[in-house]
Image (cartoon, rainbow, N blue to C red):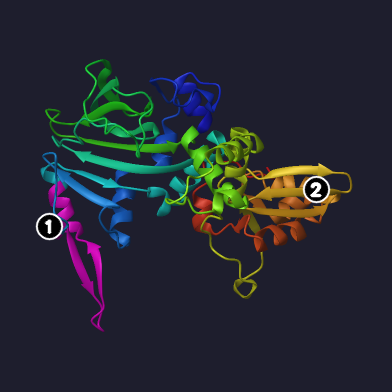
Amino acid sequence: MINAIETALGWSGAEELGKGFARGGLEDPALLSRLLTPNRLLDIAMRRSLNRPQFRCFQKGVEVHPAVYYTDSVSPRGQSIPMVNMRSLGNLLREGATLILDQANVFDPTMEVACRALQWWSHERVQVNAYLTTNDAAGFPLHWDDHDVVIVQLAGEKEWEVRAASRKVPMYRDSDPNTIPSDEIIWSGVMRTGDVMHIPRGHWHQATRTGSGSGKSLHVTFGITKRTGASWLAWLADWSREHEIFRHDLDRWHVPDSAALAEAATALLGERSPADYLAAYEQETTLPRHVPFLDILGPLDAVVCTTHFHPGIRESGETVDVLASGKRLTLAAKALPALRLLLSGRPVVLEQAAAVAGAEVVEVAEILVKEELCAVLTPELSSGYTGLVTNAGS
């Protein structure tokens, strides 16, 4: 998927992310249906208790009240669970509507794997939203996002307009509300099945099927939030608490020692660089969700690394260190082949891996699963890799 997106956009890596508008097409049509289909999206909505704003529906550019397409499923004991009324939702979609599922990666294993791949590639956190539009429905009005996005048109077509930013690199929390759209249109046209588009942060855009007649559009938007100078300063503010001078009150009745504070702040800036922050951000990110391993449920026969970012592996003589998710594991150097295999991000069947990395791969896998850097490869999680990522032992 990453290779296909890079080829479509003419990129050779993540360094182009956020630099400028780009558009192209995927060469492999099978990849599209493998990622998500309209029916799979509706199946997710049917089987889960979703709530606004995670699941929303719009018609004629206005959000439909949840009461129109939600109902309470009441158990025999009177317990009430809000569920999407699929019959009502189907009627809305027949009339023409747009439904949105935020953070589809939380509910769908393929979307989870796709976001993890983009995170390892970009070194930033990624989430994906899915948008299904039917018939003549409109989408969101002209707006800008506070993060870079990569859009993949999975089915059907939709008309887009992309404009330049009216404020350089605007932020969610900013000194300027940035409410006046730019008049400079960078691109307008139709995104068709297989098209890919990158819209940098702050660029105004809108999409619609108004006037397109009968039909559909399904696209996913991968939101990639990059670190900023403000992020670095906020991180430094946390580190400032190590120094006594920053923990003292700013006394209103006595003149603060501004020179001493400024000197300490300057020293803090020199102690931890932006590069230090970026490295710490990756290594200290909290552990992701996963199914816990319980030996009473069965043996450990297949695993996959599920950390948000690629774990760091550092060799040091007779030992090797693994740094990920705020943890530092030290193992014997002979574990290195097993670690490289198990932390590759690809599914690993342990019986096959033993022939490649040695018998100790099973013991190393047990350690990584216990430390939650790897997860049990359940059939559901495995389905997220099928057709997208090859087995590490193959």
Residue 71, magenta (yes or no): yes
Determine whether 82 is above or below 377 in the image: below
Mark 1 is surrounded, within 10 Å at the Cα level, by few (under 14), some (14 to 19) or many (20 or more) other residues, namely few
Res. 203 visible in picture: yes
Asked which quadrant contains residue 107, the reply is: bottom left
Magenta span includes 47 = no
Q: Residue at x 63, y 55 (%)?
A: 374
Residue 316 picture quarter: top right
Q: Position of residue 176 (x, y in %)?
A: 29, 32
- Secondary element type, mark 2: strand
Amino acid carrying label 1: it is Val
Q: Quadrant of the C terminus?
A: top right
Q: Which mark is residue 320?
A: 2
The residue most toward the front is 254
Q: Is residue 248 left or right of residue 355?
A: left
Part of the protein shown in magenta: 67-92
